[in-house]
Image: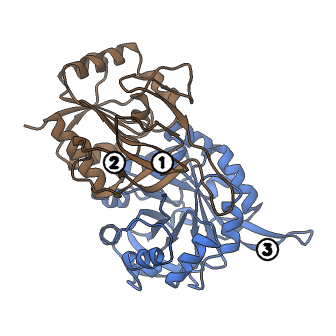
Amino acid sequence: MLSKRIIACLDVRDGQVVKGINFEGLRSAGDPADLARRYNLEGIDELVILDITATLERRRAMADTIRAVARELFIPLAVGGGIKTEDDAAAAVEAGADKVSLNSAALLNPGLLTTLANRYGSQAVVCAIDAKHAVDANGNKIYAVYSRSGSTAANRDAVEWAREAEQRGAGEILLTSIDRDGTKIGFDCEMTAAVSRAVSIPVIASGGAGRLHDFVDVFTAGAADAALAASIFHYAETSVHALKAHLRAHHIPVRL
Amino acid sequence: MQSRVALIDYKAGNLTSVRKALAAVGAEVYTPEQPSDLADAQGIIVPGVGHFGATAALDAEWTDAILARVGEGRPLLGICLGLQWLYEGSEESPDLKGLGVLSGICHKLKGDSTEGHIIKVPHVGWNSLDRLSNAPIIDGVADGAQVYFTHSYVAPVTSDSAAATTHGERFASIVQRGQVAGVQFHPEKSGEVGLQILRNFMKMVG
């Protein structure tokens, strides 16, 4: 039976892992390669490196950081943050990324998803979507998509954008709840389920993980295929192993 | 002396991770530019992700050179799309032939959107191996060990299957027939279990 994946996210700025609350108020959490090593030993299923400064400060993804993390890691590694062009993606792949995650660049140029899928295969293309609950002009409830690290409204609905991304060649959706990010009050199960049921590619839920049981909820009520967290692992609030043991006790299939 | 293994790059996906994992298990890897470069290969690896149509690049010349080495008893490992290519063909590209050293045709996994029984296709993530044989390629791999998959098409379970995996249906996740082996998952992305399988292949190479 296919396991539900637990993915650790390393938000990297200036070569250090940092984690903020609601995209702001960053504090340092350590060296990316050290953290990657620890998570791998604890049984993490996958890693994501997000260059969180890249989009705003127009930096290229940090090839050195990717190389250092990829060197001794034999699990999937995704890289995102500031990948704007095919060349940016190629640099990340050459450095050792198995997947590249596109966010603002995909909204601006959806064809880039197709270009990269044709070059590396859909399995290497992740469409990252940052969204929050909103109401449209007609008073309908929507999941409003934001670009540029949550700062710019994209005037799109997350369900509709996820469907388009799949059609254009994305192999996975990384869905982050802006409302929940960094709050530790639980994943946005309603939004996650809405997107997960709309596509046949895996949906990775992100934003809001606090308690172990939040992961049970996102895999059941949220219909997520994978869940991503950062701070609860970085500060050793819980280990990956303890989380997976909890999931297994609640009949969620995991790799343990 | 390290064993020289030919890693065939037919432009079906990036090979950085495969190279890294092979280096980690002590293999000396080279990329043959043309079929005649296979002459000195002590083992051959056919990787690949994506559409079966990409295997069209492995034309008659490549196929003949690979079959010649296999005929001399040199081990061959197919990874992911490379495993599917070991069969007679795939419904993904009905007009293309596979290598045909294993019997059967690859077909697409069936998805299911029924609430409570959701089966998404592509099959992406960690899934378990049900051991079916004691083939050398699966040596030291525990029954139920998990490995990382990402694919939509599968090969049927036959007498050549060393392990099966279930995602809606059972399919061949590890195969071995003589010196020819294949894995549907990505050993280079499957942690210690994946490295063990690559070590097993290197043992076959000698």
Quadrant position of residue A239 = bottom left
User: Taking B91 as reference, is B46 left or right?
Assistant: left
Can you say whether B31 is above or below B191 in the image? above
Q: How is the image coloured?
A: by chain
Is B77 or B175 nearer to us in this picture?
A: B175
Give the percent coordinates (x, y) of residue B80.
41, 39
Query: Label 2 belongs to which residue?
Result: B187
In the picture, which chain is blue? A
Q: Secondary structure at mark 3?
A: strand
In the picture, which chain is brown? B
The chain ID associated with circle 1 is B
Residue in the picture at 68% in, 67% down = A193
Can you say whether B97 is above or below B84 in the image? above
The chain ID associated with circle 2 is B
Judged by depth in the image, the label closer to the viewer, 3 or 2, is 2
The chain ID associated with circle 3 is A
Instruction: For label 2, count other residues whose C-alpha is less than 10 Å away and answer few (under 14), some (14-19) or many (20+).
Output: many
Give the percent coordinates (x, y) of residue A177.
64, 73
Residue A247 visible in rendering: yes
Query: Label 3 belongs to which residue?
Result: A134
Q: Amino acid at mark 3?
A: Ala
Q: Secondary structure at mark 1?
A: strand
Res. A252 mark: none
Instruction: For label 3, count other residues whose C-alpha is less than 10 Å away and answer few (under 14), some (14-19) or many (20+).
Output: some
Q: Amino acid at mark 1?
A: Thr
Q: CA distance from mark 1 to mark 3?
A: 34 Å
Query: Label 1 belongs to which residue?
Result: B150
Is A16 or B191 nearer to us in this picture?
A: B191
User: Taking B90 as reference, is B178 left or right?
Assistant: left
